[in-house]
Image (cartoon, helix red, strand yellow):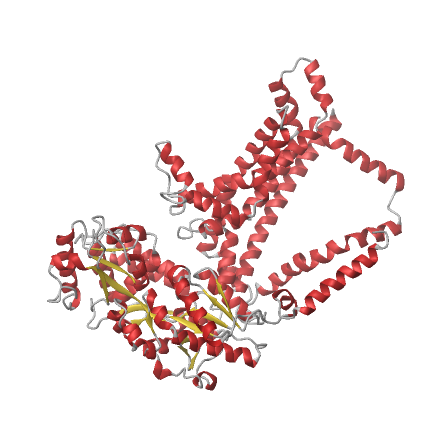
Amino acid sequence: MAGLSRRSFLAAAGGLTLAGGLSACGSPVVTSFTGGQPATADVIFWHLFGGGDGANMATMVQQFQKRTGLSVEATLLSWGNPYYTKLALSASSGRPPDVAISHLSRLPLLAEAALLEPVDTRRFESVGITQDKFTPAAWKKATVGDRVYAVPLDTHPFVLFYNVALAKKAGIVTSNGRDLQPMKGKDDFIAAIKAMKDAGGQYGAVCSITADPSTCWRLFSMVYAGLAGPIVSDGGTRVTIDRGAMEETFAFLQSLTGKLGLMPSSSTSTTASTLFSQGKVGFLFDGEWQIPTYRGVKLPGGKALDFNVVPFPALLGPKPVAYADSHSLVVPKSTARPAQRETDAIRFIKGLLDESAIWAGGGHIPAWLPVQTSRAFLKQKPQSNYIQAAFHAIYDPVAWYTGAGSDFQTAMGSVISSVLSGHTTPKGGVDAMYTSLKGFSTARPPV
Amino acid sequence: MTTSALAAPATGAGTELRAAGGRAPKGENRAGWLFATPFLVLYVLFLIGPVLIGIVISLFNTTTVTSGLGSWVGFSNYADVLSSGDFWASMWHSVLFTLLTTPLLVLLPLLFAVLASRMIRHQWFFRLAFFAPYVVPSSAVCLIFAFMYTPQTGLVTNVFGWLGLTAPNFLGSTSGAWFAVVLLTLWWTFGFNFILYTAAIQDISEEVYEAASIDGAGPWQQIRSITVPLLRPTMSLVLILQVLASLKVFDQIYILLAGGPNYSTRPVIEYIYDTGFTSYRGGYAAAATMVYFVILVAVSAGWILVRNRRAAAAARGETSR
């Protein structure tokens, strides 16, 4: 030790650190100082899928890697606000991933802040990613201004689950003993729920309405959209509520949980899934992503739960409407991304589209028509029952504050939940909605 | 004068030095600045700098998704903050959290520090046991408590069941959520105040106790008439540290509850985070921060004022005697 002075030790240590840094130019530690994008894999991919969707996404990524030999680093971040906060900040600070998932409902802000690369370009077209190969509603929602900023991966609508055995007992199925008889309008719908109640016991239908603002918002949006247009316009700066339509919507929904007694007026997501999976209720209103939850569920008697999923019929309006959102693939803007990385990113996006029959396993309708019309998808039941919902899809209104998991959905859903549980009258609900929207629409927009 | 007994040696030494040498020699002064430089650089870079930047951007419509300052909006961000119901609601949540935690975290650690100092054997074990939770990172603490608070299966929920009580809905109801987060905070930060008290107790000279016991004072009398009065300066230090720490609560509430249910526990720092980062409204969030900063400074200044006045009154009392 005597030969090593403090000075030479420090010099050696410093040299080693520097050498270590230089030898790994793409390492995240170095790039965090130099301001570049980390290059730990050919494609860096961010998503927000846990559970079954996460497993499906992992399979798709693996398939892609096996097929192309490109390496992909997939990072799972917390769903909702935390994810979009990180995605936006990474892009605005110039260090974004190469490809990221975004809900189409969250696209307007990201696109208007110029954080995304447009996808209606030659480079995307050259691999076959063109408008005519996507569900039109999804492609339209991916358009902000006059450019397209996202490649839709799926449409995931709010749908109607039903217990087949109970439906048969209620006498609301067709001659094949499985499909529901066609329903037109709210009277048919109420009659069907009543029949389910008589066949099943306590309730005819259930929906998670307590402490679940997003589900409340989806249910409400679907019914309301049958009657009127978006509740805010001009990029979210103007409240455009149709008071009559909204009051009618609230009154209809409240009658189901209130005076008709067809649905519990207080039920969390656990209540809903327990009642439906134990065969105690005929209808469940929920997103198709819940399908994996009920697969292979055994009824208390030991038999398997036989359920089916269909789109909602037209309720208050003349045409059926489906509230939906879409997962899409975006390329966040980065000034320093080499051309090769961009090419790999586009290949990766195309690869995921091609694998999206796997993705449909989670209940989603592929937006990529070559897969949507393929046998691999059409034979998947009940997913292929509600393809039409993707074409009737209504998304969140366009504004900087709307979208999946946003504060907006929480605020709207809280009002709706209060109406559904009977604490607020339909008229009071309209007023509360208006007051809440005033707050959002008058806040100074960030873009 | 019991309060000055503890402080006397330190101030005495200070005055002696100053009396002997007058002002510090020039070279020493320069060395002092030199030694303070690393700290000062960091202080300016990470504290003064950001505060100044914050003041500037609070006057603009700065956002976190676009570069540059954005458009000049004058004081309208401040007007919006001051008239925002959500801001004041979150402000109240921070104050409520302070009111709920401060008494517990000032008095309970005192009690346990006195008890632990009375242990004749294995004192180290009690000190360690009380201090250990403090070094656990907030995310880990919150994950563990989230498991324990889980409805139906969580440990705390089950304990309520064993006692024949119905557990509150810890993560789903407002009152349950406050209970959950206060209990977590008590367990987690207890050790810091405990250590401050323990250090102060060790500073009390053995001779005082010896004299007291010769005079026939029992253990309880010793605690009441010696330990607690001599700990008063430490108590006021713990109190102000605790009030300031509680007012800036964020981690536990954000991780455990995300400010829920329905924002009914969201503290003001989370409000600032939510508007500034999640809603991308940087300028507005900076204005909210400044309002909050001014309130904190006012609380601290008020505190110092009260203390100085009290000290002055005490000094007057001494000279008149």
Q: Position of residue B301 (x, y in %)?
A: 63, 45
| Side (left or right) of B76 relative to B46 | left
x and y, in percent, of residue A245 in the image = 24, 66
> In the picture shown, does residue A444 fall above or below B40?
below
**Depth check, front residue: B83 or B2:** B2
Judge whether B290 appears above or below A381 on screen. Answer: above
Residue A92 placement (x, y as % from top left):
54, 70
Relative to B213, B132 lies left or right: left
Q: Quadrant of the C terminus of chain B?
A: top right
The residue sitting at 84% across, 50% down in the picture is B29
In percent of width and height, residue B108 lies at 55, 32
Q: Is residue B58 above or below residue B223?
A: below
Q: How many marks?
A: 0
Quadrant in which residue B175 is drawn:
top left
**Residue B61 visible in the current orientation:** no
The front one of A337 and A439 is: A337
For the question of whether residue A186 can be seen, the reply is yes
Residue B291 found in image quarter: bottom right
Q: Residue at x 67, y 28 (%)?
A: B230
| Quadrant of the image containing the N terminus of chain B | top right
